[in-house]
Image (spheres, rainbow, N blue to C red):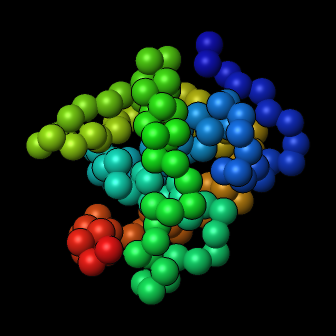
């Protein structure tokens, strides 16, 4: 129902301008980050999305995590995905949170079954280990 066909190679960076690629990257981030917690904060999604192309995610370089791209573009993608029922959005204490749903699970499982985006999934997994508390501290220092 929501199957998106991709061409090889399976490593597609976030610098692509394709809406489908952006939706898939955000879907991968949402699924991987909500395996342990129910919700994904917009701040963490922004951090992971902006650092996906970069090998720089040390403590010193985290202060600039919003600079390489336009935040409005990511909000448009999030709303577009929610409207197409790829994930759900809720507001928690005045902040946007993204939640996976059955469609998120189904698409992610088909991506894993086809062994697509393996490098991107590994990279998201590494970047998702940064805690929200750490992101909040750097945001305050910034």
Q: Name the residue: 49% across, 26% down.
A: 81
As drawn, is 41 to the left or to the right of 95?
Answer: right
Vertical arrangement, residue 80 with respect to residue 70, above or below: above
Q: Residue furthest bottom?
A: 60
Vertical arrangement, residue 109 with respect to residue 101, above or below: below
Where is residue 47? Give x, y as percent.
45, 60
Residue 12 visible to an observer of this rendering? yes
Where is residue 46? Give x, y as percent.
44, 53
Q: Name the residue: 60% across, 44% down.
A: 25
Where is residue 80? Give x, y as percent.
49, 24
Judging depth in this view, the residue of 113 and 46 nearest the camera is 46
Vertical arrangement, residue 41 with respect to residue 18, above or below: below
* Quadrant of the image containing the C terminus: bottom left
* Quadrant of the image containing the N terminus: top right
Where is residue 73? Give x, y as percent.
52, 39
Residue 35 visible to an observer of this rendering? no
Number of numbered discs present? 0
Q: Name the residue: 71% across, 59% down.
A: 119
Residue 44 in which image quadrant: bottom left
Q: Residue furthest top?
A: 1
């Amino acid at each position: 129902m929501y199957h998106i066909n991709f061409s090889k190679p399976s490593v597609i960076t976030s610098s692509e301008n394709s809406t489908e690629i952006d939706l898939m990257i955000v879907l991968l981030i949402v699924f991987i980050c909500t395996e342990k917690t129910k919700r994904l904060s917009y701040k963490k999604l922004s951090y992971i999305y902006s650092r996906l192309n970069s090998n720089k995610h040390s403590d010193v370089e985290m202060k600039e995590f919003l600079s390489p791209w336009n935040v409005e573009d990511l909000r448009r993608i999030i709303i577009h995905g929610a409207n197409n029922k790829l994930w759900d959005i809720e507001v928690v204490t005045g902040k946007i949170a993204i939640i996976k749903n059955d469609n998120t699970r189904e698409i992610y499982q088909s991506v894993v079954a086809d062994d697509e985006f393996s490098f991107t999934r590994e990279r998201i997994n590494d970047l998702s280990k940064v805690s929200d508390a750490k992101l909040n501290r750097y945001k305050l220092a910034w």
